[in-house]
Amino acid sequence: MSRGSTFVLASLLALLVWSAAPTEAEAQGYFGVGVGPALRIDDWPNQVHIEAELGYYFSGRANGFFIAFAPTQSWGQDFWVLRFPFRLGGMINIVRQRDFTFQLGPTGTIGFAASDHFDNGRDPDPWFHLSIAFMLRFLVANERIAFYIKPAELEFAIGDTGRTYFGNEAVRYILTGGAQFYF
C-alpha cells in the first residue's frame, strides 16, 4: 500500500464517520485516557502506550454502541508510533445497581499510523492500523466516571516502509487501563 493510498483510505474513513455522527440531543459524550504496555508480537518494538478518546454513545447513556476518535502514541527502544484511529464498539450492562455498573463488550479501532526512529532525519513511515479488543468497565458517580481495562487487545498495522529494520506489517498485544469521564 503506497503512502498516497493510505492517506486516501484514511480520509474516506474520516468522512464516513463524520457524516454518521449523531446530534447532541441523542448522544452522550465522553473523554477518556489510558496507559499500558504494548508488547511486540511481530515487528514494532515493546513500548509504553498512551491513549486518549473523545466519543459519543448513541443511546444517550454510557452503554450500547459508541464511536470515538482515539489518538494514541507509544514510544520506547528509540522508536515512536502515532496512531489516529476511530474506535467503534458496544458495551453491555452485566450488573447495574444504584451506585455502580459493571459492563463488558467488544471494541476495535481502524485508522492510520506513522512511525519512525527518534534520531532519524527521514520522513515517518505511514501505516494502515486496525485493532480488536475486549473491554471491562466499572462505572460510578451516577455513571459519570468509569474505570476500564482492556485485557485482550491485538493491534495490526500494514505499511510500505521500504526499509530493512522493520517489515511491512506489525502485530502487538496491548494491555491498557484507564478512566473515562461522561458529559
Image (cartoon, grey):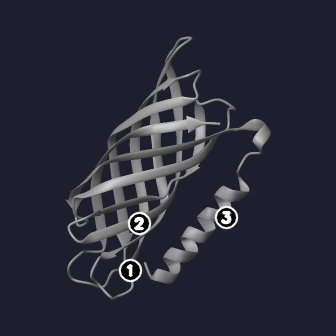
Q: Earlier in the sequence, mark 2 or mark 3?
A: 3
Instruction: Quote the CA–CA distance across marks 2 and 1.
Output: 10 Å
On screen, residue 133 above or below 124: above
Instruction: Quote the CA–CA distance across marks 2 and 3.
Output: 20 Å
Write down the quadrant of residue 65 in the picture.
Answer: top right
Question: Which kind of residue does numbered mark 2 sit on?
Answer: Leu
Q: Position of residue 68 (x, y in %)?
A: 57, 49
The residue under label 1 is: 124
Q: Dots 1 and 3: beta carbons under 8 Å? A: no
Quadrant into which the N terminus falls: bottom left
Say how many tags the image has: 3
Instruction: Quote the CA–CA distance across marks 1 and 3.
Output: 24 Å
Q: Residue furthest front?
A: 141
Residue density around tag 3, few if under 14, some if 14–19, many if 20 or more, within 10 Å: few
Q: Residue furthest top?
A: 98
The residue under label 2 is: 82
96 or 129: which is nearer to us? 96
The residue under label 3 is: 15
Write down the quadrant of residue 104 in the picture.
Answer: top left
Q: Position of residue 171 (x, y in %)?
A: 28, 59
Residue shown at the point (52%, 49%) measured from the top left: 53
Q: Earlier in the sequence, mark 1 or mark 3?
A: 3
- Badge 2 marks a residue whose secondary structure is strand
As drawn, is 98 to the left or to the right of 73?
right
Question: Which kind of residue does numbered mark 3 sit on?
Answer: Leu
Q: Earlier in the sequence, mark 2 or mark 1?
A: 2
